[in-house]
Image: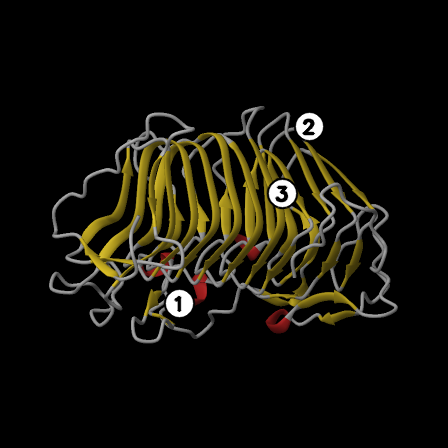
Amino acid sequence: MIGAGTYEIGDGGPMQSIPSGPSRANPTRLLGKPGATPKLVGIAGTHRVLNLDGSSNVEIGNLEVTDNSDCVYKHPDPAAACAGSMPWARVGLYARASSNVWLHDLDIHGLAARGINAGGLRDWTVERVKLNRNGTAGWDGNIGDGGSNSGRIVLREVEIAWNGCGERVATGAPWACWAQQTGGYGDGLGTTDTGGQWLIQDAFVHHNTSDGLDLRYMDGADATRVTLRRIHAVANAGNQVKVKGNSLIENSVLVGNCSYFKHKFFMTDRDLCRADGSTLQLVMTGHDTAIVRHNTISGEGAVQIGHSEGNPTDRIQVRNNLVIGSPYYLRPDNLTAFSGGRTWAITSYAGNIAWHVRDCPGDTVCDQNPHLANMTLAAFDAQPLAGSPASGKAGAVPCGKAPIR
């Protein structure tokens, strides 16, 4: 139990891993005391403030994790780059070959590189965790060999924002945002090849300098699955959400204003709306089922719901969504498409409403203004106004909760 206060972590040497607990029911627990939120501050360029390399049966909670420098690791601008004398740290939490872990009530922010760098996980639960303003990524799953995950990987009530940006220590403001064209990265959450049954729900994923949630590298195995529920993803510079294999995306608001960073910080034109900027991208592998239902989707990428790869054994079901198009950012003389891409999957549509899109698949209703509170990308508000044709259109959903707004 850690009392209130600020604690410097790191002297330039390797940090010891947290010892594993004897069992899942009896974990090692590292917690801030009730009523206190101790701050762990990485210094001296330490690679990891919290180290779970080989650690299993662990609970970590009620902590703030950061460093004490504005710098960004390997940034091309010398004014933003880290130097040895600065009180900076590379990674907030590192994990490898780690199972049965519960992270909760953590604020991981302002690290020079990654908030979390973790792979090779099994049965992790992450609740009420913020991953904001970390210099290259919020959660980077690339740990080298052995990075595939398994079991249940659950994230609930998380915020993942402004990653690919530095953080001003004095004010908490983002700055020095950069992405792939200048040597950065910028995903909110991204993995390497991975398995597992992923559940991400009640998540606010916004203003990351590449993709918001990048689950493009799921392995496509029959037992692998991604469920995204009540996701609010907005203003990420690439795709708002990208998944591969079996998936369910429901009750979410995805707003692809992927040009948000135009003329801001160190972002280049080629960083904006990358990968066609599709708001939701589905990648199929054969014998997959992807279900997209009860969502509000809008954006300025080439396609609102993109799909690629796979074969005729795949099924994509698009049900009871509201899709609102815009001029395509990279070709503003064209409207964005409702759905499209290069896939051999059998795709079906039912009960959808669309507005200002260049295609109208299936029985989609495309000639009725949906009348939402605000349909501009910069200030999108998915609340239907009185008389909206979207009100009451979709049936009840099994979870019984309203979509996040």
Q: What residue type is labelled 3?
A: His
**Between disc 2 and disc 3, whose residue precedes?**
3
Mark 2 sits on what residue? Answer: 312
Q: Nearer the viewer, residue 75 or 120?
A: 120
- The quadrant in which residue 4 appears is bottom left
Q: Name the residue under label 1.
A: 267
* Image-quadrant location for residue 372: bottom right
User: Counting other residues with Cα less than 10 Å from the Cα at mark 3, is it few (<14), some (14-19), or many (20 or more)?
Assistant: many
What scheme was used to colour the molecule?
Answer: secondary structure
Q: Which amino acid does label 1 sit on?
A: Met
Task: Tell me the residue at 67%/66% (across/down).
Answer: 326
Along the polypeptide, which appears first: circle 1 or circle 3?
1
Q: What element carries label 1?
A: loop
Mark pair 2, 3: CA separation: 13 Å
Give residue 260's position: percent from left, percent from top.
Answer: 51, 69
Q: Is residue 96 above or below residue 354?
A: above
